[in-house]
Image (cartoon, helix red, strand yellow):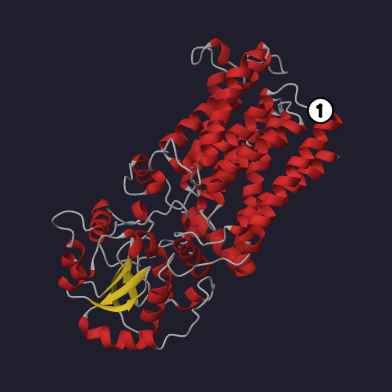
Amino acid sequence: MWWLGTAALGILGFSVVLAWNNTADNDLWARLAVGARFWHTGTLWSRDVFAFTPTLPAWIDHEWGAGVIFFTVLKIGGPAGLMLLKILLALTALGLALDTARRRGATPPVLLLAAIPCAWTILPGYVPVIRSHALTYAAFALMLWLCERIAAGRRAWWPLIPVLILGWVNVHGGFVTGFLPPAVYALAQSPPCLPRFLQGRARPKDGSSYAAWPWLALAGGAVVSLLNPWGWRFFSYLVPALLRPRPRIEEWSPMPVWNWDAYTGFRILTVVALVMVAALWRRQDATQQRRLAPALVLLLLTAAAGWLHRRHAPFFGLAAAALLPALVTRGPGGRPAAKCLTLLFGGLTAGLLLRFLPGASFAVLAPIGIFPVRECDILLRAGFDGNVAVPFDWGSYAAWRLYPRLKISMDGRYEETFPETTLEANARFYEREGADWDRLVRDNRVDFVIVNHRRTRLTPVDLSALGFVPVYLHPLSSLWARPATAARLRATADALPDSTIEPLDPAIPARWPWRSQPAILTSVHEHARQ
């Protein structure tokens, strides 16, 4: 059919954009380290082994399963496998959300039109290679799809929701969003909970007046969420982590109202959603309104979440893809509409190919300036042991490259392994904030300092006053060291080859001293038996 060819054009264009965004995520390296641990020993760390600063007494890793998946894909498919996984997850998430709308009666032309702003909105979640959040967005779309299928009559499918939660809880802490769709469906069927026009009180085929499946799914999901390597202790970490404000992390900050950035699609889709709901909601008959009520509630909740924290924008894109097309009960049809849509997608795809195809690749990049590549090269080649202060965003890469000879001050695992005091000390040092900005160096033995010149207020005078001398200076970054090691490090820097190592080499952790690492967690399999 014509719309399949048109959809193929859209998939091609979206895939090219995703392939163009092939820079590794800042936290990918920490995830790979956890996955490597599981591959080599079948165990997880019980505490941090990468940092020299104060850490939490227990390392409860809400993304451990994602790390195992990423490292497995890396070993089997190499960096290209990670790129392919990212693209497949993005297409799967968008496809499931649009299929949810199709099952609510949306026509192919309307689905194709909705796919454009919705794909733009979810894109920020799939730009880096690759985040654990990419799995959560796809799982959220699958949860929407399951809830719609069950509400439409497949009541026997409700046990699939706890099964999904079971896998999700061991992949990413974002599994808590998986409780939102069944909870909304449950409340929509309970008259005291919502206004009458939002009550989806459709009578099941068995003659009963109330559907119990959302409550059973919620209860089952709550029970199976305890089936993780830490049991109930997992939530003693997760709940405070979810409530933590994180004012220093940009993606957790509120969405700017006016800006041209990665979240422009979210802002445009917000306007589109407001206009469509205002114009089309009253045109639905009472039965259709009640059926779409849970999706409308989800749309409002995900929109609010996106405005509060910009990292949640993809949830809104998926909710919009599942609801907005279903509001258009009579979409464009006939040959003229088909030709116009095909021309639109053809032109859009041609534009995307011209813009992004030359830079698209399945190779995952970790470039100088985005990561401390040459600084790690120098430290590794010089062969020193010690402690290196590193910016928050660069800590994960440095740990992956430098462990076990050098330990880092901080990385993106944040609340998993570090107390708030460590984050503050590291941030104040690089931002030169407050009277005790140098506390990181005063309270810890720091042998080397890596500086990201784009995100620091440190000056050469500040570092010299602390007893460090420059070893390697680049417009985007630099390496500083104590005078006793400076001469050898400079000689190493002068002798550096033009190329660096492949940082996504799965053989890197094979050289780590697995047998001598202390305080490992009991094997996941043994823990399950206990």
Q: Position of residue 140 (x, y in %)?
A: 57, 40
Q: Is residue 201 left or right of residue 463?
A: right
Q: Is residue 350 above or below residue 296?
A: below
Residue 151 or 346: which is nearer the viewer?
A: 346
Residue at the far left: name it: 435
Residue 378 percent location from the top left of the image:
38, 81
Q: Is residue 456 left or right of residue 76?
A: left
Residue 379 point in image, percent of width and height: 36, 79
Which residue matches tag 1? Answer: 333
Question: What quarter of the picture does the N terminus occupy?
Answer: top right
The residue positioned 39% from the left and 84% from the top of the image is 381
Q: Residue at x 55, y 42 (%)?
A: 165
**Which amino acid, mark 1?**
Gly
- In this rendered view, identify the residue nearer to me: 353 or 464: 353
What residue appears at the point 49 percent right and 53 percent down from the top-left corner? 528
Q: Position of residue 420 (x, y in %)?
A: 26, 51
- Give above or below for 483 relative to 128: below
Above or below, 184 against 476 in this view is: above
Q: Is residue 46 visible?
A: yes
* Residue 223 shows in this picture: no
Residue drawn at (20%, 55%) of the image: 433
